[in-house]
Amino acid sequence: MKRIIIYGLILFSINSFAGVPSLSRVRSLFEQANMQKSSCIKLISLLEPYDEINFPVLMGYKACGTIMMARHVSNPFSKLLYFRKGKKMLEAVIELNDKVVELRFLRYAIQTNAPSFLGYNNHIAEDKMFLKKAVPFLSDIVLRDKIDAYLKKYH
């Protein structure tokens, strides 16, 4: 009986996490999503099952994908809907996880590229300062290099 319970727990844990996409795949889709509608759609659908509680970074990417969909639709009303929905999602996940460097980087990247008339630029200075302080301590070298390069571009 004890073995059955242990095997069941092992199978449950394997099945629970087998489908979680790698961050490298998600980051790659994110980079392509700005220019390719198909990558943007893939990013959003890949991350659909994830929420801000259990997968905050994935939720941040889903929010950014939603914001970037505004770039790929032609109807101004749809553009605004995508932007507002993604913005709301991104702000909600950051509110719950405001010390997560990658989330703050995502917001910084979105805000530095958002058209000024949308008024979504209120955290640029704060996020930039946060990132400059946090980046040297990141153990993820790929992320650290991406953020460093981006900060140099938008200093």
Image (tube, rainbow, N blue to C red):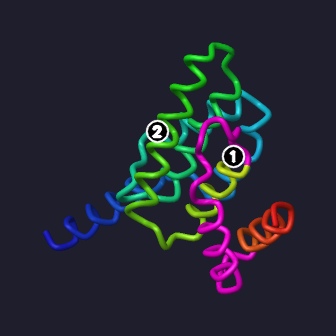
SS under mark 1: helix
Image location of residue 116, percent across then percent down: 69, 41
**Residue appearing at x 71%, y 68% in the figure:** 143
- Main secondary-structure element of the magenta-colored stretch: helix
Reply yes or no: does residue 117 show up in magenta.
Answer: yes
- Give the vertical position of 61 relative to 123 (above or below): above
Q: Earlier in the sequence, mark 1 or mark 2?
A: 1
Q: What residue is shown with label 1?
A: 30
Q: Is residue 122 left or right of residue 136?
A: left
Amino acid at pointer 1: Phe
Q: In this picture, which residue range is highlighted in magenta?
A: 113-141
Q: State the separation of the CA atoms marked 1 and 2.
A: 14 Å
- Give the vertical position of 37 relative to 144 (above or below): above
* Quarter location, residue 46: top right
| Quadrant of the frame with the N terminus | bottom left
Image location of residue 79, percent across then percent down: 60, 24
Q: What residue is shown with label 2?
A: 48
| Quadrant of the frame with the C terminus | bottom right
Amino acid at pointer 2: Glu
